[in-house]
Image (cartoon, helix red, strand yellow):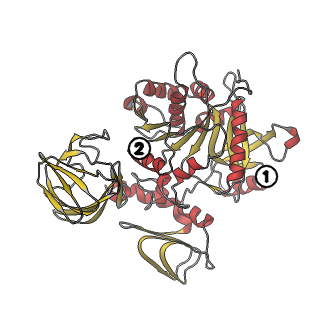
Amino acid sequence: MAPCPDQAISVHPVILAGGSGTRLWPLSREYFPKPFLNLAGNRSLFQETILRLDGIERVSRPTVVCNEEHRFLVVEQTGEIESPPLSIILEPASRNTAPALTLAALALTGSGAERPDPVMVVLPADHVIKDMPPFRSAVRAGIELAARGSLVTFGIVPRSPKTGYGYVEKGPALDPAAVGSGPFRVSRFIEKPDAPQAESMVRSGRFLWNSGMFVMRASLWLREIEARRPDIFAACRAAHHAGRRDGTFLQPDRNSFEACPADSIDYAVLEKAAGGDAAPESADCVVIQLDAGWSDVGAWSALWEDGARDADGNVKVGDVHAESTANSLLIGTHRLLATVGLEDVIAVETPDAVLVAGRDRVQDVKNIVAALRANGRPEQENPRRVHRPWGSYETVDSGPGFQVKRLTVNPGASLSLQIHHSRSEHWVVVEGTARVTRGHEQLTLGATESIDIPVGVRHRLENPGDVPVKVIEVQSGEYLGEDDIVRVEDRYDRGTPEQPR
């Protein structure tokens, strides 16, 4: 039975931050993927996703679902915007959006005689939305419909016949007096049509882009996923029940979750609900039309299409000089990027990799990432600046038997107490005041002071102050891999030696 619409509504954002963004390489990497990049402003896409819910009534702190490798990125970026999550659910493996949402719904409904049943506002963490008033108005309408028992999705008014998007066909309006604006019952979903079909659908005016954003009661999602994909429901329930909580972090049982089939919210439930494959007491599937400057930034061409172009049709970011260049996206992150005589290209410069591609071939960038992964190349995993829970490090130089890194340790943070079997280290403090443990010694080092850490000696670098500590680290030895670590103590509960630093 649908909940009484007059009762108080508890609204919980569920932020799905598990995307990899391989088509945005070399900026997006395995350990620093698209949601955490600043691609459309001064904040990351993940941060903007959380902040755009400000001003919507009854919205609580978000639940974030992310890969366990990205947990400290979530902590760092939510701290920067002063929006701590209610929970951070750590997926031990990628299984698409339906299992991710099932874990979130299980966490939010809890247990006991009076189980909560919040309305979940489900948002991917890697979208751009430029116009906030219509977005917030649509979310408010979605919350009210979901509170009455509907499965609600948002359809984007199409700007062109895209073949890379799914589409939603509008059925009858819920309110016959508001035929033009909806909301509408969903007639059907269509996945990634070919060009002639997409053109025909857009001309008809009946089709919207499928945004991948949803609103629904947590109990309704659990009921629907159990009825339509009992295998997913059973695996997620087992993973949730056998999991553990560590402060804000919820860690599902690895074995149970890795056994879960992968599927999307759309395929697992919504397409079946809209297509007449009705489970008992099946909910209405409703689409709200949205025209708010939406983009999923799925490829480099999206940044060119949505960016501010100059008189030659170029979008330029960073230190860029373009000579006789037109209709191109040019991004320089580390040094001068200069082009001559180019048209319709994408050029992205980073410290360790440069991408140059035809603007009509950007969907194939994922093939480069797959090849790099197959060949064991590090350029698909980490950017030059690698984030850690204590701060970050950058590799400045390396060669046979040596490596030079620049460490930044955040105020109050600490590296693990650790031992290296194959390398010694030399630390030079450049800024701030560092506390160093070396064997049984504990020393305080200021700017310009240095210390040697021999092979096999326990050591730790800490920042006891309120400003970042910057250190140049020179490693030397027969093996310099990040897995040459034995952790003796670690406040961040990381493994040894599989997870670095």
The residue that disc 2 covers is 71
Q: Residue furthest right?
A: 177
Q: Amino acid at mark 2?
A: Arg
Residue at horizontal 21 percent and vertical 44 percent from the top: 417
Specify the quadrant of the image occupied by residue 245: top left
Q: Which mark is residue 477?
A: none
Q: Is residue 438 above or below residue 348?
A: above
Q: Residues within 10 Å of mark 1 (few under 14, many from 20)?
A: few
Given residues 332 and 393, the one toward you in this image is 393
Q: Position of residue 5 (x, y in %)?
A: 74, 27
Given residues 197 and 210, the one toward you in this image is 210
Q: In this orientation, does residue 108 appear?
A: yes
Q: How many marks?
A: 2
Q: Position of residue 256 (x, y in %)?
A: 41, 28
Looking at the rendered structure, the secondary structure element under dot 1 is loop
Q: Amino acid at mark 1?
A: Gly
Image side of residue 54 versus residue 391, left or right:
right
Looking at the rendered structure, the secondary structure element under dot 2 is helix
Quarter of the image for the N terminus: give it: top right
Q: Is residue 21 above or below residue 254?
A: below
The residue that disc 1 covers is 205
